[in-house]
Amino acid sequence: MEIKKELTGNKLKISLEGRLDAVSAGDLDKVIQSDLNGVEELIFDFADLDFVASAGLRVLLVAQKRMNKQGTMKIFHVNEDVMDVLEMTGFSNFLDIVD
Amino acid sequence: MNEKIYSLWFLKKGSIRNRVFRLILLGSMTILVVMGLLVVYGLYTMNSVFMTQSDQLSGTSAGYIEDVTSQQITGRLTDVAKTRALAIETEIWGITNDTDYLAYGVENVIKHPEYYARRTLPDPRFQKIRPGEVYIHQGGSLQASGVSPSLQQEIGIMSNVASYIEPMARQYNQFESSIFVGSKNGYIIASDNAPGKEYINMTEEFLNTYEPTERGWYKNTQARGSITFNDIYVGADGYPSFTCSAPYEDNDGFAGVVAIACSVKSISDIIDSSLMGKSGISFVLSDKGKIMLSTNHEGLMNDVDGKDLRKDSNESLADAVGKMIAGESGWQIVELEGQEYFLAYAPMQKIKWSFGTIIAINEVMTPVQTARQHIVDQVGGFKDLMTDQVVKFVLVAIISIWSALVLLFNLTSWLTDKFVAPIKELTGGVREIASGNLEKKISIPTGDELETLANAFNNMTDKLQNYMSHLTKVTMEKEHIATELAVATNIQESMLPHIFPFAPERKEFDIYATMQAAKEVGGDFYDFYLVDDEHLLVTIADVSGKGVPAALFMVIAKTMLKNSVLSMDSVKSLADVMARTNDQLCQNNDAMMFVTAFMGILNLTTGQFNYINAGHNPPALYKASEKRFDYLPLERNFVMGGMDHIKYKGQELTLQKGDRLVLYTDGVTEALNDSKELFGEERLLDTLNKTKASENSAQNLLLELEQVLNDYVGDAEQSDDITMLALVYNGPEKA
């Protein structure tokens, strides 16, 4: 999976491309752990994200919890497959998913 | 390219030893051959130059000797001719002067009779005459006619001439000689010298018939009218006899001839002393081209023939004679009787004669020829010696080169072995290391690349050893962990209900479940148990992530759920169980792990099925009435452990006899084939619908599903835990 970061002031945009599975979730976890200092607006772009595994959901949960403390987190361009998973797991109720 | 190079003999593939050996041998042999060729070329050049030069040397030196010798010979011949001519001229000139003086004395007497008294001289007819004694002799005709008184008077006066003759005769007394005055009147006044004799021997014939006016000298001189040199002849004593005569006159004119005839040994000696070699001839040539005197009295240039050589048919001789008479001096080559001679000549100017001496060229040149031959022989000998030395040298060279080759071969072999020995040792050492002896240390103290290589090998062996011991350690650790994990797997498996058939005495249901962890331990779990006689509880859950952390979380989740379920008072409070468990899981969940779960409780009598879903995949429900599977409609409850204080909504349905529930985790729907394609919910539903659901037991249903899933995945690696649970409701037990 490819992770693209774009920091503008206190706004961080993370674009994910490919499969967010158990392996790539580790990479994303590192980004979340290290790059969120001072970020008040976190934006995920899921336009090219094909798949999210439970490990990936965990990272999203971590990110959401962190951002609950220091700002906002939004997810853009979620495709149908990923949306299914988010809905099934109830994540869609907690995440700010923008159409 | 390489093929080409290796096809050369000295680079042909083979052991390094052989290649090095061939290279060194080839190099050394090339140098040896080149040097040999140079030496042979040098020898050849030196030899041919020497041969040419020695031929030239013998030629030029012999020619030089010839030239020098010719010059010396001709120069000496010319010098000899000059000095001898002068000496002879001096001798002859003395006699000529004496003759002239005598004629003057006789004329003095005959023209002035008044100054002289009559004198009487002895007559050999009547007494013996001593040498040097002056006598008078009357010729034969005068004896016959008798002496008249006037003639008597004249003879008496003329006898005074004796006073001129006497001292002159003493001057010549060393030789046979005569000094005489011949009168036209037929008498002579004379004195003879005959060394060693007491008296002069006179024959009867001379005493009786001698007629002075008839003699050649008299006639020649009278005819000539001046001093005359008469032919030279060899006298009784063996020496050439020379007569010089001159006319004298009285008051009436010609009155007689005076003459000095002497055998001049000095001239002979002079001529003889000018001889050179065996073929040498010296001669005196008169102004008339006649040989007056010669060392040869017969044969070549003799003084007997009396020919006029100016008219000789031999042109070279006639030419030379011409030059001699012309008063020239010098030398030239004449050919006489088929042989070449040097002829040197010089004039006697006072008497118009010339002196010549000849010598055969080949005689003169014999020493030169000998010298030339000697040089040629010497050079030839030297050439032979040279050739001999060259042959010897070549022989020695061949032996030396052969020895050098043998030595070179052995030396090269030895050197190559020496050179290759470290490589062999290295090869042996490496082979030993390769065969497993890592303790082996290669020691090649050559100080070159081989030592570096050996050190590198030793280094590598050390590292290999370290690595292997490290590997052994790691492997042991891994094995240790693996052993522990195997134990953990056992523990996890034993935590899940795994004895089938479960509760076989209960005919209301048939249940079967499998869990296939992607790693040794998994995060999935299922659970089922009879809460009481009427109620069967089923659970399937999936912890986020895999491996040991997931397994630990799973254990916690499973234990908490079961504890909560067992303490609930009504099936309606299933949602409370969920909420309570969620809250418990959220406590101290720093790792943010969560679990999706589906839990249901079945009333075995009524078929009522109360269930609650916490973010888990929707189970498939087979309705016997519809004979097909469909996904169970679900509330979207959040996962457990993610956030606390969440309300969960429970759901409810009633199962009919023959209905079936299939629970699964996302390991099924998200299984990937080789093309990374998801198995998917649709395919799952299709697969389930293709099974003979109504006939299959719970176990067979899962086995069939598992078979299809395995076929789909093929050789692709299992990426997630795969957990399935099937429940068949057979309706209430007929009591």
Image (spheres, rainbow, N blue to C red):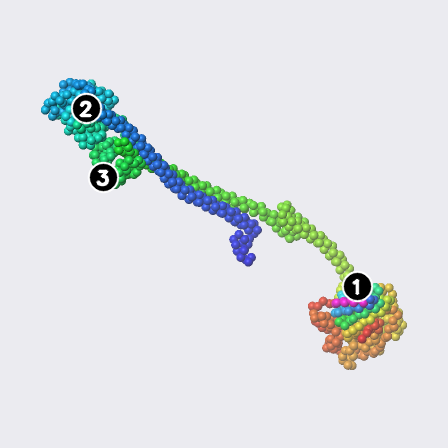
Choose the circle earlier in sequence order: 2 or 3: 2
Q: Quadrant of residue B52?
A: top left
Report whether mark 3 lies on the same chain as mark 1: no
Q: How crowded is mark 3: few (under 14 residues within 10 Å), some or many (20 or more)?
A: some
Q: Quadrant of residue B321?
A: top left
Marked residue chain, label 3: B
**Circle 2 or circle 3, nearest the eye:** 2
Residue B665 visible to the viewer: no
Residue B599 point in image, percent of width and height: 83, 72
Q: Which of B296 and B394 is in front in this view?
A: B296
Q: Is mark 2 on a helix, strand or loop?
A: helix
Question: Which residue, given by chain and number where applicable, does mark 3 sit on?
Answer: B311
Q: On screen, B57 above or below A2?
A: above
Identity of the amino acid at label 3? Answer: Lys
Task: State if disc 3 and disc 2 touch (CB < 8 Å).
Answer: no
In this view, the residue farthest toward the left is: B145
Question: Is residue B32 located in the magenta-colored stretch of the structure?
Answer: no
- What is the C-alpha distance between the residues marked 3 and 1? 151 Å
- Identified at 61% across, 50% down, the residue is B427
Question: Which residue, given by chain and number where applicable, does mark 1 sit on?
Answer: A30
